[in-house]
Each structure stands twice: as C-alpha cells, then as structure tokens.
C-alpha cells in the first residue's frame, strides 16, 4: 500500500530546494566577486609581468608615437671656452605624424601656404617616411622655427602636423661653418665602404652606432674627419605623442618628454677657435666681402682663433649648394691663390738669411723688368733708387725680381719650403718664372692659413709654432680622453732678420701701401698684396700683418676676391683688405682687454 504525502508537505520541500539553489548561486557569485576583486587588487598593487602598471604602459605604448627629441645623435663641436660653434639647442621644430595625415598632398599645400615650405619637398619627405618607416614614425619637416613662424602656424594649424621642442644640430647662429662642415645623406660609395667595414645594421647588428641607409653622415669639415668620434647611438631625450585608434594625435593629452640613459658612444670636439673672435670676424667680413677669407692666429701659442670663408651656406639646406659655384669651398686652407706682394717677405727673408743683400744696398727701378727672353714684368711705377726697406714700403716689383734671381732657383725653393710653402720652381725653371714667383705670381699658390702662419713666425722673432685648430676630445661625461698639445716651436729665421722685417713692415703700414691697417697707439706691421688672378683682369687683394708691434699678439690675414658690391676688378690690398684688418684687430684686442 502506497502512502502519499499530504499536498502541503511537497510544497514546503520545494520551497526549501529553491532556497538552497539560490544560496548556492549567491555563494558562487560571491566567490567570483572575491576572485575578481583579488585579481584586480593584485594587478593594481603588485608590479608583475601583467601588473596594472605594465598593462597600462603597454596600452600607452600602443597608443603613442615616439620621436627623438634630438635631430642627430652626435657630440658637440665646441670653442676653446666650451661654447657651441654650431649653436645647437632645443628649438621649436615642425614635426609630421604620418598616422594623422589623411591627404599628404593637401597637407603639403597647406604647409606651403602657412610656412613657405616647398610643397613638393614636403610631400616627398612624408611619402619617403611612410615607405621606409610606416605610419607610426614621426619625421621632422623644418627646424629652428622663428617666433613669427610659430605664431603663424598656431593660427593656421594643419592636422597631423605640430610644433614640438627638438634639439637641433645647426642653429641660426652657427659659426665657422666651413671648418665644422655638414651632414648629408649617405651615398652609394659611402654605403659600400660602411658595408665593407661592417658598420651597418645589416652587417653588424651588435654595433650601437651601426648605420642605416637613411641616416645622415659627416661629409665635409670636422663633421666628416671625426665622424666616428662624434657619432652617438641614441638620443638624449625622446618625445612621446599620444594618438587614437586611427592614428590621429590626441592634442589634449600633449607630449611627454622622456630622458634616456647617457649616450656613452658620443664624444665632443674642443677647438682652439674663440667663438667671440669668430663672430667679430664674420660680422666684419659680411659687411665688406662677398668672396674671400680671413684667418686670425694667436701668435704666442699658434692657436687659430678664427677662420672665415665666404660665400657662406646654410648647414640645414646643404642640397641647395651641391650644384652651386663655390659656397661650400673652404678658402682658408685651400692652396689655390696667388699671394702677390705678401709673398715678397719670403724672398726678403731668404736673401737676408743668406747675406745676399745689405740693408743699405741700392736697387734701381725703371718701372719694369726685362728678361733675356724679352719677357717684361711691370712695376706699380718707376721708383728710382731704393734700398730693401724702401722696396718693402713701396712694394717694388723690380727690386724683388732682382732679389729672387740673386737667391736662385734652389735658394728660393729652399726658403719657401722652410717657411711652409710648396712652389713650382726647380733647377730647370727659366728666369722669368722665378721672377714671377718672387712677386707672388706664377709658380706660387698659397692658402690664407699658410700666409698667416708665416707672418706669425715673423712676429715670434723667427720661431715657428705650427698652427693648431683642435685642442682636445672629451667623452660624454666631459672628461678629456685625447689631447692635441701645442707642438714645440722651431727657429726657422734669425731674430735679426725678423727685427728688420718687422721694422720695414711697420713702415709699410705707417707710411706705405698699408696705411689703412695702421692702428694708432699699438701699431701694425704688415704688407698689402694685389695678385692677378686671370687674364680678364680679376685680382685678389691681400693684407697680412701682425699687431701690436710690441709683443705681437695677433697675426691676421685678409683675402678679398670680390667685394660686397660685386666688384672683382681693380681691387687693391690697401683699399679692399687693409681696412678690414684694422677693424677686426681693434675689436678683438678690445675684447681681450
């Protein structure tokens, strides 16, 4: 017999079962909540591989674009007082973020309208960057923006492009550009050499300074000569810009400046140049000279204080000058110029040293010198009877041709070489060639630096201290790791010879052809020169001298090929070069005091 439960009891049991299930479900939810809370607590508090900090950084990195806050990873090129010669510094820089640019052509056109940047160049840069680096790598479009340019951009913003602070290599006040040199793209020949030397990322991925084909490399001046010394491996700082999922910049979040570890690969060059002296010379040459050069040497040490060559160029736009005439040419150490009468002191020194002339001996100038083969060389005028000092004061060609012939081919070459010059005179050279060489024309080519070194030797009473432009190298911590000491001086001329030359050169400046270089109170000992450069009448005007007369401090050479007004014919050393010498000497010596 089957007993049935009363209807009321089944209902009660069902209620209890339902309650148990609800309790179990609630317990499961509670446990899950505790697990989630515990996991969240772990992720937020502990710094593990999947911690909140690490996950946040990963998310941030995914939404960010990194840009080097330094244009080029290179050590500095400094003057003797550790001032930057390239005027490197953090300046407003126009940067494009390719991921945020929808229409490259339209963006380029807008930038041309706002900032006068070539639309074609801008478009090519962005396209090239997208092809080589993708859409997440920013690129620099223009460095060293002026306040006016920055303001104009802020009023006419372009999507995907912004202005951020970047350390640029060459600032607007960069000096000594021909000495420093410049960077340019790596050409096929250079790349082949780097590959052979295993200095590329493909041939040596472990080398911190390994090159990529898109890198820039020193191709001229000290930038090229000391490429391996200067080149670094990473930027000093990085800028992180934030973007959305579509690659557009999130302007409101701004930019984060991130300091990197010290770059132990880069070193700094310290030169003997004095930035203030360099600025003085550049200011004066830019007022007066379109084509030419100026050299300033510290006589006691032989250190070069200033080297200026003109015409000038922009180190940030080198491509503009690669097909130019001579903007990139460094005239200061180029052995390619006729020295004219400034070279006559080499002949004077030679005949005095060999005792082939006495100071009292008289020479007759008829206004021209005729050689046996009937070749004629004219003088400025008919000087009549002159002794050696008077010949120097009046710059008499006839007298110096006589002295050069007396010195002879061998003696002429001997003293030219002894005083730092290479001449094209040998035993077979005809008298007319030797005569021309004796007045600084055919057979003699020099650089302004060689002439300055020679006149500095006269100022030291015959001691030659080889000129020096590089002082030392410092590492990234500022410690000296290599020094280029002053070389020991050697006496190449007798003190009596130099005393005579100093007296004659002082007279030549005080009452002779170089009067516009005379400095009242301290005096100048120097010589003008006017050398014929070609048959079309173009000349090169010179003034070389030392100052002051007592304990000479500076040897300065001014060479003028073309004046600011475009004049290259009819120049004279006395009118074109001597006044520039005086202005430079006055300003530098006033600064030193």
Image (cartoon, rainbow, N blue to C red):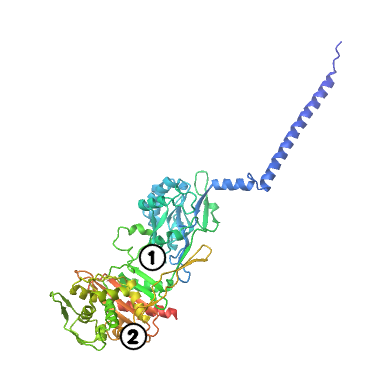
* Sequence-wise first label, 2 or 1: 1
Residue 340 in view here:
no
Residue identifier under label 2: 496
The secondary element bearing badge 2 is classed as helix
Q: Nearer the viewer, residue 467 or 34?
A: 467
CA distance for labels 2 and 1 = 40 Å
Q: Nearer the viewer, residue 324 or 29?
A: 324
Count of marks, rendered view: 2
Q: Quadrant of the C terminus?
A: bottom left
**Residue 80: x, y in percent?**
46, 71
Which residue is at the far top?
1
In the rendered view, does 408 fall on the left or right side of 305?
left
Q: Quadrant of residue 281?
A: bottom left
Q: Quadrant of the N terminus?
A: top right
Above-or-below relation of 361 to 313: below
Residue identifier under label 1: 177
Crowding at mark 1 (Cα within 10 Å: few <14, some 14-19, many 20+): many
The reply to whether dot 2 and dot 1 touch (C-beta < 8 Å) is no
The secondary element bearing badge 1 is classed as helix
**Residue 172: x, y in percent?**
42, 64
Residue 183 in view here:
yes
């Amino acid at each position: 017999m089957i007993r049935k439960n009363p209807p009321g009891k089944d209902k009660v049991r069902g209620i209890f079962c339902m309650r148990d299930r609800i309790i179990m479900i609630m317990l499961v939810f509670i446990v899950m909540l505790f697990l989630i809370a515990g996991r969240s607590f772990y992720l937020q508090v502990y710094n593990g591989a999947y911690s909140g900090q690490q996950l946040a950084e990963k998310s941030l990195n995914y939404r960010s674009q990194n840009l080097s806050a330094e244009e080029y990873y290179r050590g500095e090129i400094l003057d003797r007082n550790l001032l930057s010669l390239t005027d490197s510094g953090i300046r407003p820089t126009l940067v494009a973020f390719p991921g945020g640019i929808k229409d490259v052509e339209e963006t380029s056109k807008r930038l041309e309208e706002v900032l006068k940047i070539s639309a074609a160049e801008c478009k090519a840069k962005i396209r090239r960057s997208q092809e080589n680096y993708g859409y997440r790598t920013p690129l620099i479009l223009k460095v060293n923006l002026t306040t006016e340019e920055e303001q104009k951009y802020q009023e006419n913003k372009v999507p995907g492009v912004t202005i951020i602070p970047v350390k640029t290599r060459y600032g607007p006040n960069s000096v000594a550009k021909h000495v420093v040199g410049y960077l340019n793209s790596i050409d096929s020949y250079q790349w082949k050499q780097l590959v052979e030397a295993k200095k590329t990322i493909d041939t040596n991925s472990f080398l911190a300074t390994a090159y990529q084909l898109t890198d820039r490399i020193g191709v001229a001046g000290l930038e090229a000569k000391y490429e391996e010394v200067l080149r670094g491996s990473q930027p000093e700082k990085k800028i992180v810009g934030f973007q959305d999922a579509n690659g557009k910049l999130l302007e409101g979040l701004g930019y984060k400046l991130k300091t990197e570890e010290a770059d132990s690969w880069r070193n700094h060059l310290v030169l003997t140049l004095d930035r203030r002296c360099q600025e003085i010379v550049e200011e004066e040459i830019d007022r007066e000279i379109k084509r030419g050069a100026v050299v300033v040497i510290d006589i006691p040490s032989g250190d070069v204080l200033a080297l200026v060559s003109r015409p000038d160029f922009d180190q940030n736009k080198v491509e503009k000058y690669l097909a130019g005439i001579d903007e990139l040419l460094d005239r200061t150490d180029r052995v390619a110029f006729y020295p004219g009468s400034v070279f006559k002191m080499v002949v004077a020194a030679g005949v005095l040293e060999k005792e082939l002339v006495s100071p009292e001996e008289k020479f007759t100038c008829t206004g021209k010198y005729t050689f046996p083969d009937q070749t004629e060389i004219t003088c400025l005028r008919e000087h009549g009877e002159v002794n050696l000092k008077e010949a120097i004061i009046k710059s008499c060609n006839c007298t110096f041709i006589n002295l050069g012939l007396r010195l002879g081919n061998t003696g002429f070459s001997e003293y030219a070489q002894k005083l730092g010059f290479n001449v094209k005179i040998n035993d077979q050279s005809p008298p007319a060639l030797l005569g021309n060489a004796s007045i600084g024309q055919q057979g003699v080519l020099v650089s302004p630096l060689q002439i300055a070194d020679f006149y500095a030797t006269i100022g030291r009473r015959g001691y030659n201290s080889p000129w020096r432009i590089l002082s030392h190298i410092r590492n990234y911590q500022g410690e000296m790791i290599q020094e280029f000491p002053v070389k020991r001086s050697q006496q190449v001329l007798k003190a009596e010879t130099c005393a005579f030359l100093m007296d004659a050169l002082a007279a030549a400046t005080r009452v002779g052809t170089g009067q516009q270089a005379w400095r009242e109170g301290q005096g100048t000992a120097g010589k003008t020169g006017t050398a014929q450069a070609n048959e079309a009448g173009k000349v090169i005007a010179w003034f070389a001298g030392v100052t002051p007369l007592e304990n000479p401090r500076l040897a300065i050479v001014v060479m003028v090929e073309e004046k600011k007004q475009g004049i290259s014919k009819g120049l004279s050393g006395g009118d074109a070069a001597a006044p520039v010498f005086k202005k430079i000497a006055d300003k530098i010596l006033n600064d030193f005091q």
